[in-house]
Amino acid sequence: MAKSQHDKVAVISGAASGIGQAYAQRLAEDGAHIVIADVQPADETIKQVEKAGRQVLYVKCDVASEDAVKSLAAEVEKTFGRCDILINNAGIFKLQPFEEMSFADWRRTLSINLDSAFLMCAAFVPDMKRRGWGRIISMASSTFFTGASGFAHYVASKGGLIGLTHVLATELGPHGITVNAIAPALTRTPGAMARGPPAGETDMEKSFAVAASRQAIQRVQVPADLVGTVSFLCSDDAAFITGQTVHVSGGLLRT
């Protein structure tokens, strides 16, 4: 797998920490150069990529902004000349009962989680088509399949990503581009820790324990559990896999 990713260019949104950071580190170890698109500082991710001996470009970018994404694409073109791998990882997930959710809350979540994927694909797909090769991976969620309470906006955004994945797989398949999604369970990340527990649970450790108890593999999921799947889906070995939502959730969903 690493050989097929040598000198590929991977653009990863939300790669300053958490799952996106883990993806950046793994793909750099596989031989890819990394572009970090994030509004947060990414010093640690930059260090990890450089330690792997790969080039890294950090662009402070609000991926929900059309102008910002266009500027990002211009920086990628200037530095690397192309994007081979696009990972739509940026997202927010505020715990919020539906009756307490404002339209502004709804729109902000959909904008960051779903609109950003549209904008990133719109920016990088045309060149992928011209070159006849590309990998697009978006982060879905097990909550779309479980209907987790308190996340109406988040679950809707992840359903939208899955729908976008299906259609883009159909349209881009003839051009050598695969489009897939990965659906994890509750994962121990800085974002999840900052979110706080739902009503009835005292802290996030309790939330993690409850989530793990529902899985076939009963331990808390961490970002490292996802990197093998993203590495495989980005490789030539996965060239005949597209339009799929891959459940990497310790057997939370047994389909």
Image (cartoon, helix red, strand yellow):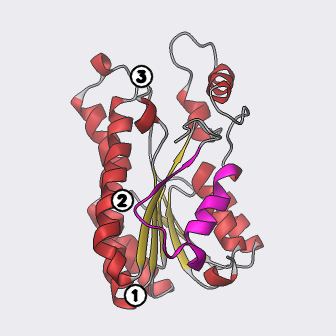
Q: Secondary structure at mark 2?
A: helix
Toward the viewer: 176 or 221? Answer: 176
Which amino acid type corresponds to the residue marked 1 in the rendered image? Answer: Gly
Q: Residues within 10 Å of mark 2 (few under 14, many from 20)?
A: many
Horizontal side, residue 46 vs residue 105: left or right: right
Quarter of the image with the N terminus is bottom right
Sequence-earlier tag: 2 or 3: 3
Q: Is residue 190 magenta?
A: no
What span is in magenta? 225-248
According to the picture, the residue beneath numbered tag 3 turns out to be 149
* Mark 2 lies on residue: 165
Residue 175, above or below 189: below
Front residue (pair 92, 220):
220
Q: How many marks?
A: 3
Between the C-alphas of marks 3 and 1, the distance is: 42 Å
Residue 17 visible, this orientation: no
How far apart are the alpha carbons under marks 2 and 1? Answer: 18 Å
Viewer-closest of 254 and 13: 254
For the view shown, which residue lies furthest in the right direction?
Answer: 51
Residue at the front extreme of this rendering: 255
Distance between the Cα atoms at labels 2 and 3? 24 Å
Q: Which image quadrant for residue 148?
A: top left
Q: What kind of element bears circle 1?
A: loop
Q: Which mark is residue 132?
A: 1
Which secondary structure lies at badge 3?
Answer: loop
Q: Quadrant of residue 8?
A: bottom right
Q: Earlier in the sequence, mark 2 or mark 1?
A: 1
Going 38% across and 58% down the picture, which residue do you hit? 63
